[in-house]
Amino acid sequence: MIKKIIIYPNPILKKVARPIINFDDELKQLITDMIATMFDAPGAGLAAPQIGVARQLVIINTSKKKEDADHKAIALINPQIYAGEGSEIDTEGCLSVIDYTAEVERFKKIRVKALDASGKEIDFAAEDFFARAIQHECDHLRGKLFIDRISPLKRSLYKRRLKKMLAAENKKQVGDK
Ligand code: NI
């Protein structure tokens, strides 16, 4: 089932996610729903807090292009980035941050430990776009968004613009009634 994605500045996005302990059918369903939600958007990744579940689960789109129909994705449970090297600046966006992208600095290469959907430990290296997506999604689990990694000035300009956008939308909705 496609879930509603929570949008900044909703405070739910600031919550720190708790580890997953039970590898049951409920978790399998959550993973299925998150994958469907991510491809529907479409997005490069999705973290459980973005659909209001404060648990340490992220989905990463591993299709060649994020719009591709081959729909490849991996689920990382209780992920930990335990090593990082190099740095790279690139443009990022987020399904929870509407109408905005910004340059963000990230590690170029990382090593990740996580559990898979069956609870088995996985340990792998990632680089470039794949590494960026994992770093971005893992930030969500700590209540952090990419706009927390840009300059305060840029962030306040975006906040102001967002307020105006949301106010205009509300006016339109009231007018429609
Ligand atoms: Ni995001």
Image: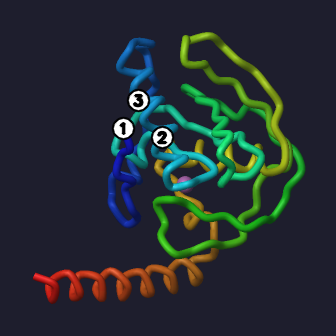
**Local crowd size for mark 3, using a 10 Å CA cut-off: few (<14), some (14–19), many (≥20):** some
Mark 1, residue position? 1
Q: Report the Cα–Cα distance between label 2 and label 1.
A: 7 Å
Q: Residue at x 64, y 23 (%)?
A: 114
- Closer to the camera, 39 or 148? 39
Q: Type of residue at label 1?
A: Met
Q: Quadrant of ligand 1?
A: bottom right
Which callout, 3 or 1, points at the residue further toward the start of the chain?
1
Q: Label 1, secondary structure: give it.
A: loop
The amino acid at mark 2 is: Ala
Task: Answer with mark 2 or mark 1, whichever residue precedes in sequence.
Answer: 1
Based on the displayed image, in which of its 4 quarters is residue 80 positioned? top right
Please tell me the numbered disc located at residue 30: 3
Q: Secondary structure at mark 2?
A: helix
Front residue (pair 165, 9): 165
Would you say the residues marked 2 and 1 are in contact, meaning their CB atoms lie under 8 Å apart?
yes
**Vertical side of 57 occupied by 134: above or below:** below
Q: Which mark is residue 89?
A: none
